[in-house]
Amino acid sequence: MKYFMFFLFFVVKDLEALSQQKEEIPYFLTAYKALYKKDPRAAALKWFEDARFGLFVHWGPSAAYKSGDWVLYDKKIPLQQYMDSAMTFTGEKWNADSIADLAVSAQMKYITYVVKHHDGFAQFDSKAGPFNSMNAAAHRDFLKEIAAACKKRRLGLFVYYSIGIDWTHPFYLTTQFYNAARPHYDSLPPQVRFKAKEDFVHYWNYVKTQIYEICSNYGPLAGVWFDPIGGAYTNPDLFDVQSVYDIIRRLQPQALISYKTGFNGNEDYISCEHEIKSITDLMRNVQGEKTAQAAEAAWQKNRTKIAELNTTMQKINWGYYESPKQQHKTAAQVMELLKTAAVNNGNLLINIGPYPDGRIVPEDRAALIEVGKILRENGFPKQDKINFMKLRSDTKKITERDLETQK
């Protein structure tokens, strides 16, 4: 009930400010003023198509374990132990200006920042629950900092929000309903209060409250980037995704929405991990035929839309990961990815996983700065706007990288 009351509170709050926000042209769309006045979302889509290149940032309390952002699930860390550790998170050397400057140096036009990953820790001042960076030792609103840095440099800001998994929320699903819903403990932790499907409404009200906060308190957004999608495909009766889309459309009319390769067809663009392709076969492999059919139906609705190829600067995982086998991409390899995105008529979103304290890994910084120099001299690879659908129609094999993030 308290999450629902918070949601109502934010619906009533700051209506005048929101009205003024809608009337202003978002700073990253000023060059698209005429189109914006006719259709804010059409202007954002044109801007996004022209943007070509963005910086993805996976970083948070999970980085302390140096084993990627699925560490809570993979190592079955006791829930309370993980949450207590997360609340000691400081990110003392995190610098949003440094992140944004790197994006500008690399000739990027936007940043996609993870504000809540699957561990449920919110990197903003959320009143929906206590598990966030303002209540943690950091006592910082990292979303506010990156929003200010992006606005200063006229970079569009996309907010990554894990809507499909929240391992620490008491009313998120259990593994009975979705295999990756919780770490596979021998017994459910006492913090998990989900007993039956009707309990999920508490989690969903929590989600809507946080989306309302994000869309109300951080200026104009370029978009919202949702993840992961397997649980939503498997439980479509619980995931009222359209109700969340409606909040975004109302509060941020220019904001683009992406949910992987799509949930219901009302997304603005598709974002594909490592390759621009359908995830139907992957969903069949890890979740079964029902989930595969849902993925295929969404793909058919969305496959002709603007595409984004998202992948990592590091070979293993998305969040910070130490291993003798870890490698980082060179500038030449990033340029090849830009060519791949171009022949697929799409953008490239390349991810960095900063150190636990927030510093950018030097290899990533150096490579991306070099990419920027190449792009300033030679420009971006030419996009193929004629033959790209042939590539999207091809069946592509499930890769090792797919299986790494198969949930």
Image: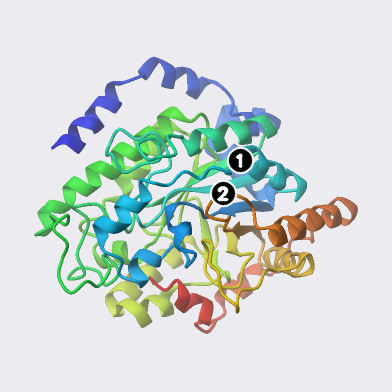
Q: Does residue 87 appear left or right of residue 351 in this picture?
A: left
Quick one: SS at disc 2?
A: loop
Point out the residue furthest to the top here. 16
Q: Position of residue 100 (x, y in %)?
A: 66, 42
Q: Residue at x 62, y 74 (%)?
A: 391
Q: Is residue 165 above or below residue 50?
A: below
Q: Position of residue 29 (x, y in %)?
A: 64, 33
- Whether residue 203 is visible: yes
Residue 297, quarter of the rendered image: bottom left
Instruction: Tell me the CA gap for discs 1 and 2.
Output: 7 Å
Screen quadrant of the N terminus: top left
Residue denoted by label 1? 95
Residue denoted by label 2? 358
Q: Does residue 378 appear left or right of residue 359 in this picture?
A: right
- Whether residue 35 is visible: no
Q: Residue at x 55, y 48 (%)?
A: 112
State if disc 2 and disc 1 touch (CB < 8 Å). Answer: yes
